[in-house]
Image (spheres, rainbow, N blue to C red):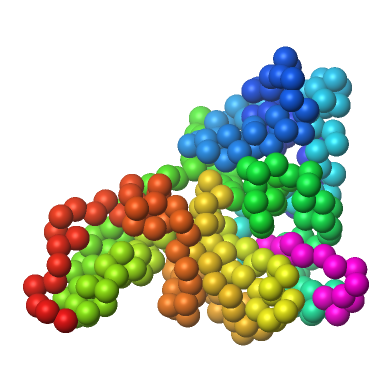
Amino acid sequence: MDPYGFWPFPGDLPVEQFMLRNWDYGCPQPASVQRMHLIAEFLRQPRIPRSWYHPERIIRPTEAQIDLILRGWRGENVRQLAWFLWQGAHEWPVLMRTHYNPTQPHHELMMQQWIALGEKYDTGHNRCWNVINHPSFFGIPERIPHEFPDWRRIFSLLPEIAGPAAVFLPDCDTIRWSDLPPWHKYRRDLFKQQILFEKESKPREWNENPFRVIEKCAAGLQYAMAAMFIIVVDQQAFVTGRPMLLYLDHHGNEIRSTRFEFTEMTLLGITSDWFAGHLTPWMWESSEVGECYEVQGEVGRVLYQLDELDLAPPTRRG
């Protein structure tokens, strides 16, 4: 089935099932506020049970539930993009515009030029370039509560952007990894070896900022946690000509981010490296680690599993 030729029915998407199953009908807050709280909670879930997406197990909402919970939240075009992402369209990035200024027509020209770079590789049937370029996503910030600041407002309408894709296997849930998937465990051994090598070969860098050295060595672990990469066109991108590249995990946490020159060659490099299973080298060198993935961050503490040997000073002076 071509996922972009299919219009999902109300309740077909896991986040909609989560809302239907957890809606508090006695809550005094407006529906929009409760909806945002539930989306934030949905993104924290460790797994997506098959009962939230299997056609024979999902809850089919009544018209009253559709009116209260689902209708008025997001349009059918957004739901179709959500379905496309849920079906596994994470091979190419989402190009996401977050800044809209009708008094600056050259912004639209810049955006169209960037969109065209990805459309060169769009075959129509196998769509590979997902574009969010409409002010309804980001043009009315006062509608969005504080759960989703800045570019994260996209989660208020499209939590599927964080992944994961559906796993259509009998009696198998779709897992949101909060630690290394089993098939990536070897990366932690390589990470530990890299820490030892870096601290001994570059003791001065280690002594200046050991956490930065560790976070740089952790690129392989960080890639293993990546579920999606997005290109954010914000106000700074229009000023500098350099959008922001972000890697996200299954919970929507920022893994790494950087600004880059948006050309056909850089786009091909980013996507080719994604297919090959590693972060683009220049992105690794120039990017900032997301707060959760810092050494003392919520995810970093679990992912890196640092011990006394890892944190010990180098044996020779810098």
Residue 26 percent coordinates (x, y): 72, 15
| Residue 151 within the segment the image draws in magenta | no
Which sits in the foreground, 30 or 38?
30
Which sits in the foreground, 159 or 150?
150
Residue 138 percent coordinates (x, y): 78, 55
Q: Residue at x 79, y 74 (%)?
A: 111
Residue 148 percent coordinates (x, y): 65, 47
The answer to which quarter of the image holds residue 35 is top right
Q: Which residues are magenta?
A: 94-107
The answer to which quarter of the image holds residue 285 is bottom left
Which sits in the foreground, 273 or 96?
96
Q: Is residue 110 left or right of residue 221?
A: right
Which sits in the foreground, 29 or 223?
29
- Is any atom of residue 135 visible in this view? yes
Residue 43 percent coordinates (x, y): 57, 40
Q: Is residue 190 left or right of residue 222?
A: left
Q: Residue at x 80, y 38 (%)?
A: 73
Q: Residue at x 52, y 52 (%)?
A: 253
The answer to which quarter of the image holds residue 311 is bottom left
